[in-house]
Image (tube, rainbow, N blue to C red):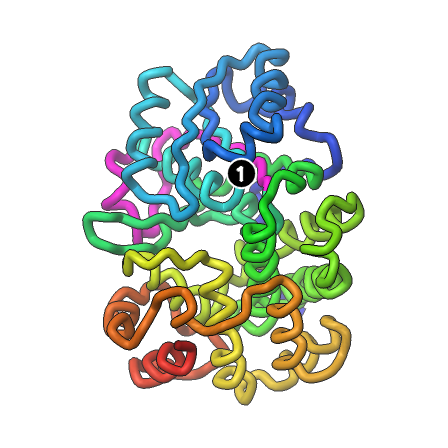
Amino acid sequence: MIINLDLPTSVVFGRGRLGELGRRTQPFGTSALLVCGRGAVRRHGILDGALKSLADAGITATVFDAVLPEPTATEADLAVEAALRAGCDVIIGIGGGSAIDTAKAVAAGMRLGPVGPLVGRTLDRIPGPVPVVAVPTTAGSGAEMTRGAILTDPRRGLKSGIRGDDLFPRLALVDPLLARSVPAAVAADTAFDALAHAVEGYVARRSDDFTRWCAGRALELLARRRDAILRTPDDPATRDDLAFAALLGGIVVANASTCLPHRLQQAMGGLGVPISHGRGLAALYPVWLRHARPHAGERFAEIAARLGGGDVHDLVDRFRGAVGVTGGLRASGIGDGHVDAILAAVSGNLDNDPIPEIDEGRLRAIVREAL
């Protein structure tokens, strides 16, 4: 048995634990930039709860609430300016993967300059890294456990990752009750993202016994709650399971990374087409499964067993239908004229995928079939 495990992030998990944010942040700094969006975290009192907890712990907070659903280096640079003006020494990302990834990018930008040129780079050690605290309000991205921040650099039209060990959050505070604020469409997208992390982490070439255990457990939890994700979203037990599945997915991504669907979906970020991460993955998945299954048949059979038994294609399609992310890429506005641009923007390691020797012909075939 060979296991490679890297978990530099402390985890605090459980209902109601947002109230501990201030006390848990104290070891990292006394002046926080709180990075979030302008919608649900304000509407549902999450931001107020976070600010109260920080104030009770003697931590001053500056709020940057301009994070977009598809974050860009432009907003991250504005947040860097706000953090430097306020003398912040810790960054707190509260929200979905967009907010948490932006928080990581801000931490990098505070030390290394403009964020745009950092997109697509793997960073060496950052001098005096600014600590990041992650508070997810969605169950899917796993960003609270990973070393990457996925953003778009508008100048280059490039959506890719800023990666580096210093971008791992120092703390992930996971309160499943916070996901009650999530709109149904976001819940659907993030649920499929969580499924994709588990599936890809299970078959990735970098996977090992531990990451496959985490991925397998996440698949079981997602299968158990598949029909409840949209039907009974406020059920506390459902929220617990989905948040835990997302956390496990983040551990999997941090250690085994992802496969071809994530590389292709990220390449769509510079198209100017409003397709969400989860919906893009869902459009690619039926095609990718057909191409990848012959090269990892035993592991895909194990995935099917974890999802309840049967054919893995049917089980994934059933999950897509349950959360309402069906249809191909055309349904989201991507057409034949976008194929070349997608292929030109693919970045990252393709060798982690079970499909051997992926070339442009294979990529083109998958994208065209996914239309």
Residue 308: x and y in percent read 77, 74
Q: Is residue 63 magenta?
A: no
Judged from this view, the residue extending furthest toward the left is: 155
Q: Is residue 113 magenta?
A: yes
Judged from this view, the residue extending furthest toward the bottom is: 294
Residue 41: x and y in percent read 55, 32
Where 60 sits versus 363, above or below?
A: above
Determine the residue positioned at 41% across, 37% down: 67
Q: Nearer the viewer, residue 320 or 351?
A: 320
User: Magenta segment, which residues?
Assistant: 112-137
* Mark 1 Cα shell of 10 Å, populated few (<14), some (14-19), many (≥20): many
Q: Secondary structure at mark 1?
A: strand
Determine the residue positioned at 48% across, 71% down: 283
Determine the residue positioned at 28% across, 77% down: 336
Q: Which residue is mark 1?
A: 95
Residue 157: x and y in percent read 24, 55
Which quadrant of the structure image shows residue 223?
A: bottom right
Which quadrant of the structure image shows residue 103?
A: top left
Q: Is residue 170 visible?
A: no
Determine the residue positioned at 34% across, 68% down: 334
Amino acid type at circle 1 is: Gly
Quadrant into which the C terminus falls: bottom left
